[in-house]
Amino acid sequence: MLWRAEDAARATGGEARGHWQAQGVSIDTRSLRHGDLFVALKAARDGHDFVAQALQKGAAAALVSRIPEDVPDDAPLLVVGDVQTGLEALGRAARARFQGRVVAVTGSVGKTSTKEMLRTVLNAHGFTHAAEKSYNNHWGVPLTLARLPQDAEFAVIEIGMNHPGEIAPLARLARPHVAMVTIVAPAHLAAFESLEGIAREKASIFEGLDPGGVAICNGDLAVSEILTATAAAHADRVLCFGTAEHNAFRLDAVTVGDARTVAKGRIDGAPVLYKIAVPGRHYAQNAMGVLAVSEALELDLALSVTALGSWSPGAGRGAREVITLDAVETDMTVELIDDAYNANPASLAAALEVLAGAEPKHDIGRVSKGRRIAYLGDMKELGRTEAALHAAVAGLPAMARIDKVHCVGPLMRHLWEALPGEKQGRWTETSAEMAEGVMRDLDAGDVVLAKGSLSMGLAAVVDAIRKMGQAPAGGDGQGDR
């Protein structure tokens, strides 16, 4: 059992009604499993409106601050003064009883993919707990901790932010043995207004380190000194990774292929070679940081390197898939790079580099030459320089190898106008409008990237591309089989 009624009541200071035992913790009735403790958080909707439904679906109990009218008097409950505070108390208690080692990761770019790399690598050494999704905010971190199994050997906690002062309290809740910052880049500039401000916020993850903890920083940044200064004040050791010579975990050479990345480097002067089954220089860089975590935890390096080779990014975060356009002529394909979950200038530059390195197929479609095509949506929360940052994408080196760029949103209009005519694709206000034309845009042999901030809904474009593979041969693409 994850939580017994009496243990949860003791942890939260709440009142347990009934003698229940919970095997998990859930905040959503759609994904709730039988035996979960349902937490009635207030978000877009008040979770108390779904308590009765959760209990009907088999929830062991519900964490509430009031008893809903449609819930029976004898329902199994944990009644607290405030649900968010109660969830945080559960997370704090779960961390206190945990005997394994905790790793926390943050960064402007790559924190979720790095969290998943860490899950893969640490799982090779022992049972590892991490959030299934990007649960990195004020409720996501305590939820991940509240779900922490007592018999796990490692836990990976992702910590994010939108405004100043968010990371340090979450880091103190997680109390990591190792904390890592992937990169500091222009993101959330509307709230911080400077890269230095973002760096100070990211560096505050080190304030939560357990005594004797290890801090891991990207050592190649203009703001690396901000990271290392804060790290030195809170960590027993500071390890830096990157391409610069002063980094103990140094990346010397990266070869990005069509379907993999090979990296060579040095760890404290000793040579290391590792591979990742996905293209991307940024993945290789963060993977070196993951190896620094492995060293900080005194794990077997060879096993960690081997495990890295089995990692691949998830949907919406650079995952690649081949869409077969014709059931008979199976070489008629489009390759999709689904990176539609989020975007900022650094992650967009990395994604375009991956697209530029991809190899289209020639002489198989209407257009003899396969193309590299991008669908790009607005990057949000960039503050006063947002227009210039979007227009500047046109000047990235990767653009030289990209054939066509379709742009979605008012901010991406600045990029669209900055592109040379031969690279200008379509511009639309919304992703739904863009999605309507993808069948006319694409042809067999093309490699296509979708990238944009989550609120832009580029998933609609991704879905439209996938549906090209569902259309009967010779059909109009609207079939639903």
Image: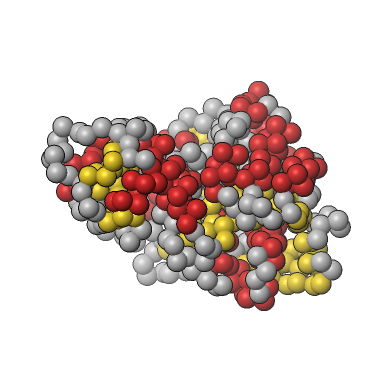
Q: Nearer the viewer, residue 116 or 352?
A: 116
Above/below status of 236 relative to 68: below
Residue 187 appears in the picture as rendered: yes
Residue 114 in the image: x percent, y percent?
Answer: 59, 56
Above/below status of 92 relative to 474: above
* Residue at horizontal 81 percent and vertical 66 percent from the top: 268
Residue 437 in the image: x percent, y percent?
Answer: 43, 42
Give residue 166's quadrant in the image: top right
- Quadrant containing the N terminus in the rendered view: bottom left
Q: Nearer the viewer, residue 217 or 208?
A: 208
* Residue at horizontal 77 percent and vertical 61 percent from the top: 249
- Quadrant containing the C terminus in the rendered view: bottom left
Picture mark count = 0
Q: Answer left or right for 289 relative to 84.
A: right
Residue 399 appears in the picture as rendered: no
* Residue at horizontal 69 percent and vertical 63 percent from the top: 296
Q: Answer left or right for 383 relative to 245.
A: left
* Residue at horizontal 42 percent and vertical 61 percent from the top: 149
The way the protein has been coloured in the rendering is: secondary structure
Above/below status of 457 relative to 61: above
Residue 25 in the image: x percent, y percent?
Answer: 35, 51
Give residue 213's quadrant in the image: bottom right
Single out the residue that lies furthest toward the right.
Answer: 245
Above/below status of 123 relative to 43: below
